[in-house]
Image (cartoon, grey):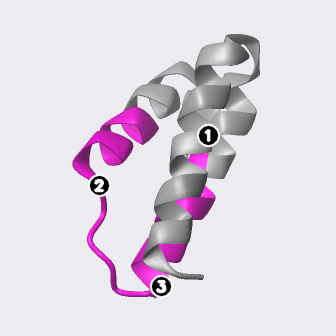
Amino acid sequence: MAFEDIKAEISLLLQEMVNQPEDEHELLEQVREKLNELRAMGMPLPEDLIELEKQLEDRFPGSAT
């Protein structure tokens, strides 16, 4: 998947978080998936997305990988 496609998907994930805050656990899993895709491609990780992952992990401490 191209970097621009991943960035677009991340943007959609963030929008979903705004629209459906009750589903933050699912959002955490999706953010992790996208970060792992970027890691696998050797792409730089957006700092704000890493921070979002940390914040969500703080809310769901049992789901840390």
Q: CA distance from mark 2 to mark 1?
A: 14 Å
Query: Residue 52 in the image: x percent, y percent?
Result: 40, 34
| Looking at the image, residue 61 lies above or below residue 41 | above
Q: Amino acid at mark 3?
A: Ala
Residue type indicated by callout 1: Leu
Q: Secondary structure at mark 1?
A: helix
- Closer to us: mark 3 or mark 1? 1
Q: In the drawing, does residue 6 fall left or right of residue 41?
A: right
Q: Is residue 33 highlighted in magenta?
A: yes
Residue tagged by mark 2? 46
Which residue carries the number 3 mark? 40
Q: Which residue is mark 1?
A: 13
Task: Give the mark, 2 or 3, whose residue is nearer the N terminus.
Answer: 3
- Residue drawn where x is 60% and y is 82% of the image: 1
Q: Which of the two marks, 2 or 3, is nearer to us in this view?
A: 2
Instruction: Give how far across and how far down residue 10 sits, in percent.
Output: 53, 50
The number of numbered badges drawn on the structure is: 3
Q: For residue 27, which quarter of the picture?
A: top right
| Viewer-nearest residue: 54 or 1 | 1
Quadrant (top left/top right/bottom left/bottom right) for the C terminus = bottom right
State the separation of the CA atoms marked 2 and 3.
Answer: 14 Å
Other-residue count near label 2 (Cα within 10 Å), few / some / many at <14 / 14–19 / ≥20: few
Q: Say whether residue 63 is visible.
A: no
Report if residue 26 is visible in the image.
Answer: yes
Q: Secondary structure at mark 3?
A: helix
**Label 2 residue SS:** loop
Q: Can you say whether 30 is above or below 52 in the image?
A: below
Disc nearer the start of the sequence (2/1): 1
Segment tinted magenta in the rendering? 31-54
Image position of 50 (left or right of 21):
left
